[in-house]
Image: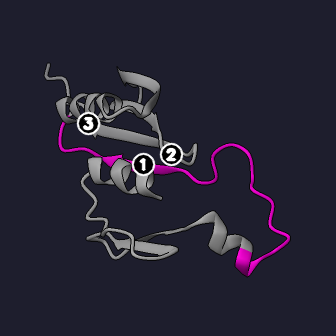
Amino acid sequence: MKNSVRFYRLLGIAVPDPVDDHLDATLPSGVRLMWDTLELIKQLEPDWVEPQGHRMGLAFECSSPGDVDATHARIKAAGFRSKKEPWDAFWGQRYAQVIDPDDNVVDLFAELPTPTA
């Protein structure tokens, strides 16, 4: 759980320090991100089997295309993995993908400036 806390703090989320087997952080929109340790999950559901691959999709809007690059670089510098380096996507966004400690793909994006004629 410690690595998840560190990862999501790099994305600007105010994740509190873990004090037990459960942790949650409330985003400004009211959405809550929650984590449980594997020990707690197995205690609650003894037959639970850990799934393979990523379990959810998250996308974080950055303040600018340059912030996508900076956030991606900060996450890599902290020792986390990149899935896709930043690129200008054909749908008009600067986009990048990183992988959180639980193998979930996390998208970083910002609108590209609209071309002027």
Pointer 3 local density, CA inside 10 Å: few below 14, some 14–19, many at least 20: some
Compute the Cα span from label 2 to label 3: 16 Å
- Under circle 2, the secondary element is loop
- Please name the residue that numbered disc 3 is placed on: 71
- Please name the residue that numbered disc 1 is placed on: 59
Compute the Cα span from label 2 to label 1: 16 Å
Task: Please check the rendered image and state whether residue 38 is part of the magenta-colored stretch, yes or no.
Answer: no
Compute the Cα span from label 1 to label 3: 13 Å
Q: Earlier in the sequence, mark 2 or mark 3?
A: 3
The reply, left or right, for residue 73 in relation to residue 18 is: left
Highlighted range, magenta: 43-64
Q: x, y percentage for residue 73?
A: 28, 28
Pointer 2 local density, CA inside 10 Å: few below 14, some 14–19, many at least 20: some
In the rendered image, which quarter is residue 39 located in?
A: bottom right
Residue 37 vs 98, above or below: the answer is below
Residue 101 marker? 2
- Identify the coloring: one colour
- Under circle 3, the secondary element is helix
In the rendered image, which quarter is residue 70 located in?
A: top left
Comparing labels 2 and 3, the label whose residue is closer to the camera: 2
Main SS category, magenta section: loop
Q: x, y percentage for residue 6?
A: 34, 51
Q: Which residue is more in the foreground, 6 or 83?
A: 6
The residue type indicated by label 3 comes to Thr
Residue 82 vs 17, above or below: the answer is above
- Under circle 1, the secondary element is strand
